[in-house]
Amino acid sequence: MTITTSNSLPNSGLAPLLCQLTIPGEIQLPNGEVVPTRTGTPTYRVIFTSEQALNTPMTEMAVGKAYLAGEIQVEGDLGALFNARASLEEKVPLRQKIQFIYDFVRTVTSMNAKAIKAHYSLGDDFYLKFLDTKYRWYTHALFQSPDNTLEQAAENKIDFVWKALDLKAGMKILDIGGGWGGVTEFCGARGVHVTTLTLGADQARYVQKILEDGGLPGQVFLEDFFEHKPAERYDHVVTFGVIEHMPNYRRFARGVWDVLKPGGKMYLDGSAAVEKFAVSAFTREYIWQGTHTFMTVQDVLAEFLYHGFEALEVVNESKDYELTMLEWAKRMDEAKDFVVAGWGEECYRIHRLYLWGGMHSFKTGSLQAYHFVARKTESLGPRPSLPRRVRQFLGNLR
C-alpha cells in the first residue's frame, strides 16, 4: 500500500468530491494507492475496489447501490461522509414514480399491510439489537441532556406522554402502531388499559407476551387503524412514528375523532419534512415501500383543526431524533457481526446507510421531528369536502 497525493485521483466523480470534505480521511484506489484528503488523523477510509467504482454516477441511488454491492467500501466514520450528500443528484426512477402512484390510489389497508410486512419481516431480534432496551421505541426518544443514555431518553419520553395526556389508572387508551409494547408496558403497569393496534405479526405476539407475563390490562389486535371499530370510545390516543404511513391526513383525523371521547387527547409524533412525499429514491427502494412520506406538520394541523380538534402544543424535537438515530447507528455498527451472520452483508449495509443518513438529515435540517397534542372538542368542525375547499380557495382570492 502506497500513500500518494490527490494528483493520483481522477478529475471528476466521487473521489475528488470527498477531497472537498473538511474532515480528514483517506481514499484507497483500485491499485492500492491511498490518498489522504486532509491533514490530521483520518476518521474514515473509502475504498474503491475497481475502476467502475471510481466512475459511479453522481446520484444518491447509484452511490448507495455501489456501497451495497461492495464496489465502494467504507471503514471508520460513515456518518462523516454524508456531508458530501448535497453534491449528489437525486433522481427518482420512473418505475418508482409509477409504483408510488399505484400504491397511493389502491386500497390503503392492503397497501399498508404489504409495506409494513416488507419493512418488519426481519424479525424482532434484528430491530431490538439497535433500539433502546427499556421500551423499544422505533421513534425518537427525548433527551433532557445530550449526556442521557438512550434508555434514559426512552424513559423521559413515556414520562412526558403520561403527563401530557394526564393519564390515570382506570383510563382506556388506544396505541396506534404500538411497536414492541412500550406504551403497554409502562401504562399498563400503572393501571391504564391499553389497546394496541399493529400490522406486524411479530410485534403483536411480542405485545401479547408483555400483557400475559405482566398480567397487565390491555389487548392487542393485528388490525389496521382504518378498520378498527371499538365498542366504546377511548379516553386518549397515542401514536408514535406512524403518521408517516398514513398520508391521507383527512381520513386519519376523521378516524381519531370517531374513536375518542369528547375532551379526549391525542399525542402524535413523527419525522417531518417541509414538502409532502419528499422521500429519497434509495429510501423508498430499500427502507420504506408503499406510500411512506414524512409528515408535513402544516397539513396535519389543518386537518385536525378542520375536524373539531384544538391544538394544545406543537414541539420541534429534531435534535432528539438526531441523537436517537446517532445511538441507533452506533449500536448497528457494534452489532455488525451479529447482523451479517443472521441477515447478510447487504442488509447490514442498507441499515447502516439508513441510520447514519437519517442522523445526518436531522442534524442538517433536511428532516425535522415534532410532537403534536390535540384535544377533541364538542364541535365536529367544518370538515370541508374537496369541492368546498376549492370554492373557499377561489373565494379568498383577491
Image (cartoon, helix red, strand yellow):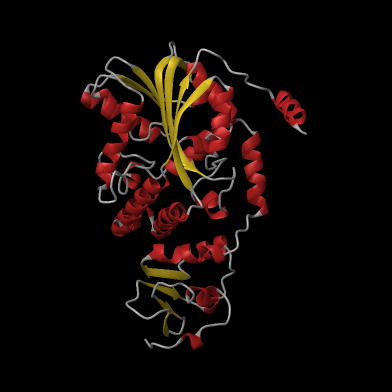
Residue at screen point 25% across, 43% down:
151
Residue at screen point 31% across, 27% down:
162
- Viewer can see residue 199: no
- Viewer can see residue 376: yes
Does residue 187 sit above or below 244 in this rendering? above
Residue at screen point 54% across, 41% down:
292
Does residue 373 sit above or below 97 in this rendering? above
Q: Residue 64: percent from the left, percent from the top? A: 51, 62
213 left or right of 197 in image: left
Residue at screen point 51% across, 37% down:
245
Rendering quarter of residue 232: top left
Q: Looking at the rendering, in which quadrant would you find the N terminus?
A: bottom left
Q: Give the total number of marks visible in the rendering.
A: 0
Q: Looking at the rendering, in which quadrant would you find the C terminus?
A: top right
131 left or right of 266 in image: left
Q: Residue 141: percent from the left, percent from the top? A: 34, 42
Instruction: List the single residue furthest toward the front.
Output: 398
346 left or right of 327 in image: right
Task: Please state which of residues 173 and 28 is positioned toward the viewer in this rendering.
Answer: 173
Q: Residue 172: percent from the left, percent from the top? A: 35, 17
Q: Residue 284: percent from the left, percent from the top? A: 55, 49
Rendering quarter of residue 203: top left
Task: Please state which of residues 63 and 308 is positioned toward the viewer in this rendering.
Answer: 308
